[in-house]
Image (spheres, grey):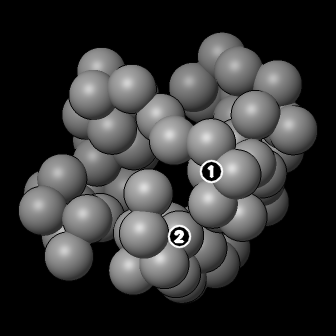
Amino acid sequence: MDKIFTRNLKTIRKSMNLTQKQVAEKLKVVESCYANWEQGRTEPSVSVLRELSKIFDVSVDDLLN
């Protein structure tokens, strides 16, 4: 993923006062998995992107762009 996605992911999460652990729990993944997405080390699947958009109440486009 590009830097825009990682920045958006972190910014949106913080704006909702959620920790990485809390988001990871909602997604049923380990915290390090979620942290890797924010750090750009790995990228989530399309289905996880959809779940993230639901959790954050934003569109997938808002996450990616």
Q: In which quarter of the image is residue 26?
A: top right
For mark 1, give the secondary structure: helix
Type of amino acid at the residue the image marks with label 1: Trp
Q: Mark 2 points at which residue?
A: 6
Direction from residue 33 to residue 58 in the image, left or right = left
Q: Would residue 26 be found to the left or right of residue 57 on screen?
A: right
Residue contact at pointers 2 and 1, CB within 8 angstroms: yes
For the residue carrying disc 2, how many other residues have a C-alpha within 10 Å: few (<14), some (14-19), or many (20+)?
A: many
The image position of residue 10, as x and y in percent, is 60, 73
Residue at x 84%, y 37% (from the top left corner): 31
Q: Please, what is the three-letter code of the amino acid marked with disc 2?
A: Thr
29 left or right, relative to 60: right
Task: Give the labeled residue for mark 1.
Answer: 37
Q: Label 2 vs label 1: CA separation?
A: 7 Å
Q: Residue at x 42, y 69 (%)?
A: 2
Q: Which of 35 and 22 is in front in this view?
A: 35
